[in-house]
Amino acid sequence: MDRRKFIKNSALASSLFFVPNFIKAFEAVATEQLGYKRLVIVQLAGGNDGLNTIIPYNNDFYFKARPQLAITKNVIKLSDDLGFHPSLSPLRPLFDKGELSIINNVGYPNPVRSHFRSMDIWQTASGADEYLQSGWLGRFLDQHGKKPYNALEMDEQLSLAMKGEHFNGIATYDYKMLYKTTKDPYFKNIINHYNDTHLSEHNLGYLYQTMIEAKSSAKYIYENTKVATSQESYPNNGFAKQLKNVAQFINSGLDTKVFYTSLSGFDTHAGQNNKQTKLLSQYAESVFAFVKDLKQNDTFKDTLILTFSEFGRRVKQNAANGTDHGSANNVFVIGKDLKQAGFYNNLASLSDLDNNGDLKYSVDFRSVYATILSNWMNVSAKGIIPTEQKTMNFI
């Protein structure tokens, strides 16, 4: 097969290009067992308004800053000062059982209010002035992974967070379709030409190995995921489908330590209340079903769920009954036997904002990552988180 035909036919390969920088795909980076702890990431894409998620329902500054947007009815009171948005009612049992820790004022120095740049910062664990090409979870795989299926993203494209310097995870929205695609005759044709020196001269050997590992991983996931699907009832939305797939993988005992999911639409510059109400309902109902599924299969005790968004929103509403890009935000951590459940810390002052009218951050998001790595995944954060961070006490 000549190079022109190879490149032309590589359209199929590009649909599986979840490991674009896979330098040593066929080489196991490490051989140690990772243990049984699993981490599930939930990304609320677009910048969720944390101030209407965890509501300071007794704070006059909140109501003055948001005459139309402030949540005034059916707030789920969790303390004397703070409560859930009404749409988060499914999470109340988790809060009451000590299975939810809410960390307020999470951010980083010199915050960036661009979606793409701020998301890169969160996914790479970099500083605002650093530009990294690998993600924090990808670097975890570099040090402690064995195969691409050690980290799975429920999407068609791999996030920067899951790309390492030498080793990446896998992105797949439908693992059965992924397996069927790797069974295509084109794949077999490519792999049969693995020793073709002509292709090696054109530096295409890395693509060979990418495809070989893709085929191997797809086969492993397909053959080791239980045929019987989850018996738990999930909401009918795309995010719930992601979590249902994750639950099926976890309950099947796949050797996967990191799962990455996302729910988009949180960029609420206008008409925020209706949009956020709907999205938070999808989030809470889906997470509740997911946790229930894990508990029924006795896998919740070994699973930690981290929810974040790339930034919060401005304290003051805008003229379109929405909120503009802000900085500090809340982070949710869900798991069994949390050391500090409930509210990890107080909400930042609404009367002492930064120069842009945003909440001042008090917790560096990288310290959250470092804590998860050290206290949950039982690995050192050195070499994974670029700057040394103090660990926290929520797990």
Image (spheres, rainbow, N blue to C red):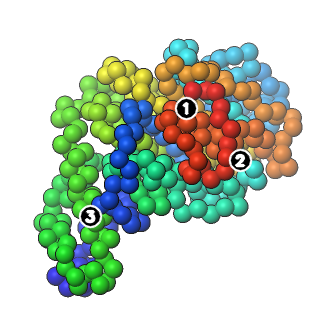
Task: Please tell me how crowded label 1 is: few (under 14), some (14-19), or many (20+) other residues with Cα within 10 Å.
Answer: some
Spatial separation of the CA atoms under disc 3 and disc 2: 38 Å
Residue 162 seen by the camera:
no
Which of the two residues, 140 or 344, is positioned nearer the viewer here? Answer: 140
Q: In which quadrant of the rendered view does residue 180 lie?
A: bottom left
Query: Which of the image's four quarters has the N terminus?
Result: bottom left
Residue at position x 42%, y 32% in the image: 37
Circle 1 residue = 375
> Which element carries disc 2, helix, strand or loop?
loop
> Which element carries disc 3, helix, strand or loop?
helix
Residue 210 seen by the camera:
yes
> Which element carries disc 1, helix, strand or loop?
helix
Q: Choose the circle earlier in sequence order: 2 or 1.
A: 2
Q: Is residue 272 above or below residue 289?
A: below
Residue 332 spot, x, y in % from top left = 58, 32
Circle 3 residue = 211
Circle 2 residue = 108
User: Mark 1 against mark 3, which lies toward the viewer?
Assistant: 1
Horizontal side, residue 209 vs residue 101: left or right: left
Amino acid beneath label 2: Tyr
